[in-house]
Image (cartoon, helix red, strand yellow):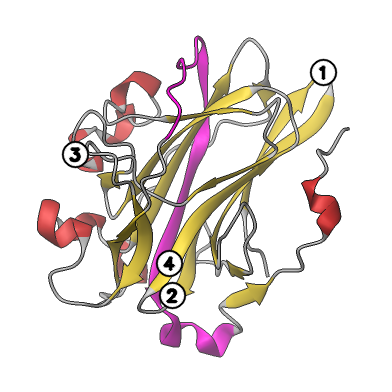
Amino acid sequence: MKTTFEVGIQENNADKNIQIGIVTGYSNNTHTLEYQIFNLNKPIRNIGFIGVDDNQIFAIQIKSNFKGRYALAVYLDGINVSQKNGIHSLNEINEDLRCNYESHIGGKFIVNNSTVSTFYLNRYSQMNDENRSFIFTNKKHSGINEILLDDPTLRNRIDVYLWVESDVLIPEYNMDLSPMVEDEKEHSPIKIGAGAPTFKTFKTSIGLENPFYVGKMLFIYVDSKKLNHLGDVLKPVINDPMNKILKNY
């Protein structure tokens, strides 16, 4: 069973990759549990289910083994996580334009991978700098979608769009946007809310100069009880101290 989605990249004729997963138990750049990813009935690359429970604080983990810079546009239940330019819905962007770097006016996160091989995104970048944590919840009137959008077509999903500098890296493939399979997604009272303020700010970075679209990853989250018959929904992590050492390839 896998816990991450992966895109392959070539750097200096060597195979490299970027892996993205959803984790919980995050603290001080480590985590204790990873959400297992289950395939759709008709598998689609880099789209899958995770099983979650009420009151779970979570983070998005991005791991890579190359030296270049990359950018992420992240939407929780259809709402942009980078909110310095205001609240924006993913549905503001036409499906065929979501691969366009400039279309995501809600904002992107820039990662300088020459110094960071593992990056965690665990909080919103809010206009008032409270930067509250990500949390799954089933409490009434606590979901970001139901309060800010009320758009059921975007519920129960975590969308991640990814670009790299095209003058540095040549992706092995450019994954097209895959349509959401609505009959696979059952309505669930679980939703994404906003936890306690962290007041941890993000550094301002210069955007990518030559962004090349690598692909989209889509995590569809449902109540863990719906997936228990398929196996454990969470995988414990062994935090080996050697993981703190930058991997050189």
Give x and y (percent) for residue 42.
50, 65
Task: Please tell me whether residue 161 is drawn above or below residue 2 in the rendered image.
Answer: above
Q: Distance between the residues labelled 4 and 3?
A: 21 Å
58 or 98, nearer to the observer:
58
Q: Mark 4 points at which residue?
A: 57
Looking at this rendering, what residue extends furthest in the front direction? Answer: 199
Q: Give the range drawn in magenta.
A: 202-230
Disc 4, SS? strand
Which residue is labeled 1 in the image? 12
**Which label number is shown at residue 52?**
2
- Up/down of 92 relative to 163, above or below: below
Give the amino acid at mark 4: Ile
The numbered mark, 2 or 3, whose residue comes first in the sequence reads 2
Mark toward the start of the polypeptide (1 vs 3):
1
Identified at 78% across, 47% down, the residue is 244
Residue 71 in the image: above or below residue 156:
above
Q: Which amino acid does label 2 sit on?
A: Val
Please name which of the two marks, 1 or 2, marks the residue nearer to the observer. Answer: 2
